[in-house]
Image: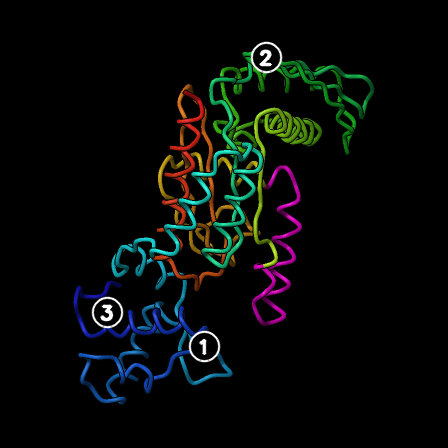
Amino acid sequence: MSIEKGSRKEKILLAVIQDFILTGKPVGSGAIACVRGLNVSTATIRNELAALEDMGFLGHPHTSAGRVPTDIAYRYYVDVLMRESRPSGRDAEAIERLFTAQTMEMESLFQEASVLLSRLTHSTAIVFAPFSAANPLRHLDLVRLSSRRVMLIVITSKGQVGRQFLRLAAPVTTDTVNRVETFLNKSLAGRALDQINSDSLLKSARFAAAGAILLKDALEAIRDYLGAIEERVFIGGAANLISERGSARQEWAQVLMEAMEKQYFILDLLKDLLGERQLTVRIGEENRLRELQRYSLVGASYEIGQGMLGSLGVVGPTSMDYARTICMVQSMAKNLGRTLNTSEK
């Protein structure tokens, strides 16, 4: 069910979203009645709020008479209603000051960028340093050492060699190990980190239980290795995740913070951001990663030539100030890419 462009219903929805982003409190008809240019009774507003709730744009907390926007409402806001924002003079000055510092080393630049982006958006910021998309996997070997122990050997196109030992939850035969090795080489040869889709490979494979376990463990180890040699992560403002009130919010924040400490989660997040090659805005359950489905992710990638890619993003509540957050993410990505390109010359 759609909303007519420019309709009273759309104006009321916009007023609810803007008020909730600003205050974080459920919005009642009284607050909407004060919106300039609406000129309707509170009874009419209540009817429209009820209609928007029936359409899935608003929720109605049991403890409050007001309404709150749903993920659907935020998506409509970002796609249709939101006006483009520009950095304020103070924000632009802070960003320029960071990227014009002559003595800052690259590691410090990435860390300071994550801290500044977090401060500007009041959210948690993640900056991925560039990695080479031109270093795909060339070949891998799986060597069965015992029924539950397999050695993985990974060779990249640049000749880097990595070895990892896999301890399996179920015993495997030599034949199973060989078949999984053949499947992985056919599926992954020539692919870089951001091109490896573990979920898709696990669904397409046709192995019995033991083979499926080996395949899953091997994929995680391969991605961990490629990530470890290529990618560096800088996180700023992690404490912002737990600054929201409410025990339920804090429980989800704890789940997300624990996930962010794990390599596979960070690599999945990196792949999602780089896969878009443009601005990414994912709201609530639009996020593929379960731990992010109570949050919104705004991210952008940057390129510094010679196949070197990086990305940065912000994770925050679904009620974040999207216009400001998108503006800050795009500005930081543009400046970071430009600065790194200049330093490479």
Q: Main secondary structure of the magenta part?
A: helix
**The N terminus appears in which quarter of the rendering?**
bottom left
The residue indicated by pointer 1 is 25
Q: Residue furthest right?
A: 146
- Gap between marks 2 and 1 measured at Cα: 55 Å
Q: Could you say which disc has been placed on residue 121 in the image? A: none
Q: Residue at x 63, y 70 (%)?
A: 247
Tag 2's secondary structure?
A: strand
Which contiguous range is marked in magenta? Answer: 240-265
- SS category of the residue bearing label 3: helix
The picture places residue 154, in percent across and down from the top left corner, at 64, 16
Q: Is residue 164 left or right of residue 29?
A: right
Residue at (42, 19) in percent of width and height:
306
Residue 50 placement, left or right of 144: left
Q: Nearer the viewer, residue 115 or 218?
A: 115
What is the three-letter code of the residue carrying label 1? Lys
Of the residues tagged 3 and 1, which is closer to the observer? Answer: 1
Q: Is residue 257 magenta?
A: yes
Kindly report the distance in space between the C-alpha atoms of the residues bearing marks 2 and 3: 55 Å
Q: Which residue is mark 3?
A: 10
Q: Earlier in the sequence, mark 2 or mark 1?
A: 1
